[in-house]
Image: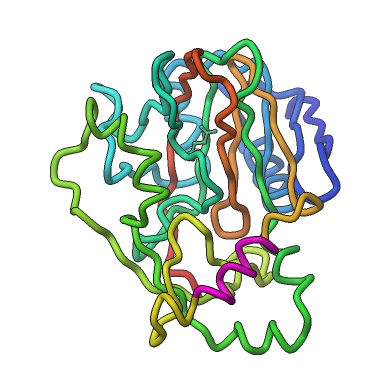
Amino acid sequence: MSALAVHPVAGALGAEVSGVDLGKLDEATVAAIRRAWLEHLVVFFRDQDLSPAQFLAFARRFGEPIEYPFVKGLDDYPEIIPVLKLEHETINFGGIWHSDTAYLERPPMASMLIAREVPPAGGDTEFANMYLAYETLSPGMQRMLARLVAVNSSAAADVSRTREDRIKDSARAGAKKEYVAAHPVVRTHPETGRRALYVNVAHTVAFEGMTPEESAPLLQYLFRHQVRPDFTCRFRWRPGSIAMWDNRCAQHNAINDYQGHRRLMHRITLAGDLPQ
Ligand code: SIN
């Protein structure tokens, strides 16, 4: 096993993992990375010059890559989508706090990005810890939320806008107009056994059995609470940087502060289970 080292990047979540070449992983190193990922929710790697085939092989060490519903993947690698913003575009893909595709019945366990082209400044990604978001609620609020189910839709206006540019040039054939899934507001992580808040401002439109208007006041409170700065970390990309995050207990937000510049990442998501 190589000299793997794990350095937390913030108090809430996130760790940089060094001393590994992700193109050449042995079983012990994969197990150590998985342990660090479960503990820190998102792990970052630097200077990993992986081809699409190597990136996919790395992803397969941790789970089963799946296709994203709305945007076509690379020609030879349908599980890898380009997360691209062109110089003249003003809205970025994923520029809203969310957990990936929470509107699917089985949302992805994990997602990973490798940076291919980064703007001279800006274009960072923020992450937030949903265990902390849950654990810092009062016992009364936790008891109430434990009984609630959230309705998640792919068609909410703010998140739909963030994929419009890519749907114009790279729409995936066969995508439904809208995906909707109901999931518990508080889910239990199948590997750590910890509880996490599982609503997000991009996809959660109501509590099951309630109207959007009735749901809005409590949802708005939770959306603000769950991304408190002390629950977050922020990652500055360089070409060859990789982030791998756990969608079951973390959210992310791509910051849109690099107008006039191009940014290209490749993204893979890994199959998940039914949130419980
Ligand atoms: C995403 O939401 O998957 C994109 C995140 C990013 O581009 O930083």
> From what the image shows, is residue 268 above or below residue 225?
above
> From what the image shows, is residue 135 above or below residue 128?
below
In the picture, measured across the screen, residue 248 lies left or right of residue 79, that is right
> From what the image shows, is residue 38 above or below residue 166?
below
Which quadrant would residue 226 be assigned to in this image? bottom right
Which residue is located at x 60 percent, y 72 percent?
A: 188
In the picture, measured across the screen, residue 68 lies left or right of residue 185, that is left
Depth order, front residue of 130/67: 130
Instruction: Name the image quarter holding the N terminus.
Output: top right
Residue 54: image x %, image y %?
A: 46, 22
Depth order, front residue of 213/108: 213
> From what the image shows, is residue 74 above or below residue 178?
above
> Looking at this rendering, what residue extends furthest in the top direction?
120
> Looking at this rendering, what residue extends furthest in the left direction?
174
In the picture, measured across the screen, residue 213 lies left or right of residue 245, that is left
Which residue is located at x 31 percent, y 42 percent?
A: 67
Depth order, front residue of 40/217: 217
Which residue is located at x 64 percent, y 16 percent?
A: 238
In the picture, measured across the screen, residue 116 lies left or right of residue 186, that is left
Q: Which residues are magenta?
A: 216-225
Q: Main secondary structure of the magenta part?
A: helix
Residue 207: image x %, image y %?
A: 45, 79
Which residue is located at x 60 percent, y 85 percent?
A: 146
Which quadrant would residue 78 be assigned to in this image? top left
In the rendered structure, does residue 63 fall within the stretch colored magenta?
A: no
Residue 204: image x %, image y %?
A: 45, 65
